[in-house]
Amino acid sequence: MKINKEILFFLSHQPVTKLVQFFISTFQKSLKKRFPFLIKRKNIELPKNINISNSYFKNLPIESSYINPKVAVYLFEMYHSHRFNLLGSGWVKNSYSSESIGTEGICYSMNIDIVTFDKEGEWLKTIIAEKDLKNSKDIWKLISDEAYIPIDWQKDFKCNFRWNQKLSFDLQRKLTKKGADIKVPWELSRMQHLPQMACFAIAFPEMKDKIVKEFHHQVLDFLSANPYGMGANWSCPMDVGIRAANLLVSYDLLKKTDTNNILDGQFKSILSQTIYKHGHFIVSHLEYSELVTSNHYLSDICGLLFIAAYLNNSEETNCWLAFSIQEFLKEVNKQFFDDGSNFESSTAYHRLSGELFTYGLALIRGLDDTKKEALHRYNHKMWKYRPKLEKLENQPWSNGFDFLEIFDTKLFKALKFSISVTKPNGNIIQIGDNDSGRFFRFSPNGKFLNTTEAEKKYKNLSGYFSLVKKLGENEQSLFWDENCLNHQTFQAATLGYFAEKPEFFPLEHLIVQTLSKHFRAKKIEIENRLETLKNPQIPHLKYSATRTFAYGISLDKSKITQHFYPNFGVYIFKSTRIFAGIYVGVNVACGLGGHSHNDKLSIFLTVNGKDILTDPGTFLYTPLPEKRNQFRKTAAHNVPIHKNSEQESLENGLFHLIGHHKTYILSFSDTSISVLYKNRKIIHTRTIEIGNKQITVTDRANTPFAQNFNKIYPFSNGYGKLLNQNYLQ
């Protein structure tokens, strides 16, 4: 971690014990990075009789009406032919010899020349280290279908760069070159397409045999090509946890449909062992810090929770269960504010963390009696990791589970926040980073284009048709375009926890209801009150500017509702025809602002479903740092710019944006709000007023500034996706 004056300023305000722990942790991480050969690696000793013993989805009644059959057939055909559309890749084939279209013109030649994928697994010598080869070959031999062509799990199939599973997980990021995105193999290795396939199998029984077989093959393929702790797909514990949960849920769903016993005892044994290994890896590599935790640590914990809930009871798994629930409760309490918003300062990450919150809490509610009993007889002294596992008498469940009602309330507030930031067209406003991250992806959410339309819509798909033409497609071939900005699957899932039927995505509702054993949480009335700054001492602001945006329609202002979230710093005015507001931001994630942008005082406006002012999104993270900064800089947002400077420095790292600003509410009414922004020597007020046919933005400041209102382009509607300039969203 780079220690600079901004971070030192932050650290100087921390307790001494936290500082000591921080520097010890930083020193240890530095040693591991500089001298990885000093780290002693231990082989895992698998416990006897480890077994996936629980089921949470017995005979789940998924109706065919829950899923569009045309979409289900299309997506399974893609998954079956090992074509995936992840993080802006387009529906490209992923194999050891597959081609790609490149990332911003960058493309590598790193395919592996494998002539045949023999049944005995001799081909694995090319990619697997000698110490792991025997076990990998034993697993590969269980794939009986000689026509099955394996997936290259180590590849960024957007630019054909691949990582190396002959090397340990902690060496992978050193291999990365410009344009290569390790998030691509991570995203595929989350296995989120498998529960979706499982739902297709239940809804459409005529597809089940092919789906069960493909599930069987892909899981064994992954396990043979990704030995424990080796390669890119073990380098981020967050993805390990998400993968484990998705493997467990998809197996649980499919097992009841497997009338041909493809998922036999041998498969179950191998899967049980690998799930145990996932749990062992997570507890050994928790993304925990005394200073800062994030959605990564929450993902670790939720993955471990699913692992412990599914595996049979033992002294070890009992500790995993107790620890995961202990930390889950602490983290959701810390990461979700009292107004329901999430501390990552991102509306997209609100969905990711919200899904972790929803499915995790539902699973805790649905634990069977043997698991609840295990929570009262674990041995905390067995726990050897940091943070510590508390004694039973210090746990909130020691006297029952009534205490969970406070978390029910917090989850309901999180749901309301998600609904509030959703525009009338069904899409959310983008604030902060958007990496398209999810916990589960059960229902497909998007629309069909054709290949010509897809390439016309997305700049990142330049050259796409030339590539897929080699796969037998034509200009009119279907292209399923996921809508990453529609969060209604999360909203439907959370409504399931409150047993309230949604108007959309009944599958998510059913799954959460089933997972929680049809628990029905109580809903509450929520009203987030604003406090205005009393007797504000504002000096004379000599510089001013006003901008008016005409709607072109007449608006009934009496139908506007207010949605104010002071902890997050977003203030929204909504009706069926208009969506307008301002984002002022807060100092979040302990002030380091990992997923925030220079977007304080940003205005957003949508009228009749058409975006007038909007945030540009994110596009990419580490592959091209200059692109990341292009989308998070001040000039990319609808904000005032003082002396052509950045609100906060972008030089502290791609995931550090130290906050110096403070904001206050000066006044508000049914159709207006005025805020005060202070940042170092800058004092700035911004007022937005909703009129009958226009919105007016008035700025005043003590230093010269320019009002900056961007057109929609450049616009990224999901990670790795970039709309062409002439395409209307």
Image (cartoon, rainbow, N blue to C red):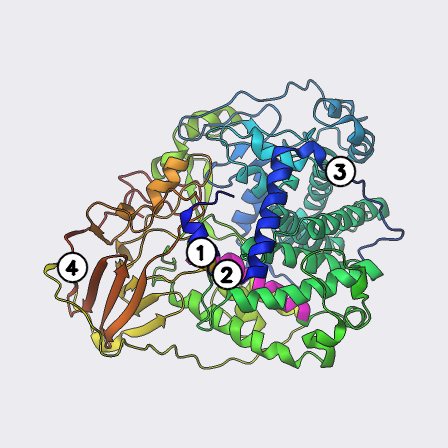
Q: CA distance from mark 4 to mark 1?
A: 27 Å
| Residue 502 picture location, percent across and down | 50, 69
Magenta stretch contains residue 351 = yes
What label does residue 702 carry, if any? 4
| Residue 166 picture location, percent across and down | 70, 28
Magenta stretch contains residue 647 = no
Type of secondary structure dominating the magenta stretch: helix
Q: Are marks 2 and 1 in contact (CB under 8 Å)?
A: yes
What label does residue 40 carry, if any? 3
Question: In the picture shown, does residue 202 fall above or below 137?
Answer: below
Which residue has dot 1 on it? Answer: 10
> Magenta residues?
345-364
Mark earlier in primary sequence (4, 2): 2
Q: CA distance from mark 3 to mark 4?
A: 59 Å
Q: Look at the numbered disc 1 and give the secondary structure of its residue.
A: helix
Residue at (89%, 51%) from the top-left corner? Answer: 48
Q: CA distance from mark 4 to mark 2?
A: 33 Å
Mark earlier in primary sequence (4, 1): 1
Residue at (38%, 57%) from the top-left corner? Answer: 427
Q: Quadrant of residue 693?
A: bottom left
68 left or right of 386? left
Which residue has dot 2 on it? Answer: 14
Front position among marks 4 and 1: 1
Mark earlier in primary sequence (1, 3): 1
Mark earlier in primary sequence (3, 4): 3
| Residue 360 picture location, percent across and down | 63, 64
Residue type pointed to by label 3: Lys
Q: CA distance from mark 1 to mark 3?
A: 34 Å
Q: CA distance from mark 3 to mark 2?
A: 33 Å
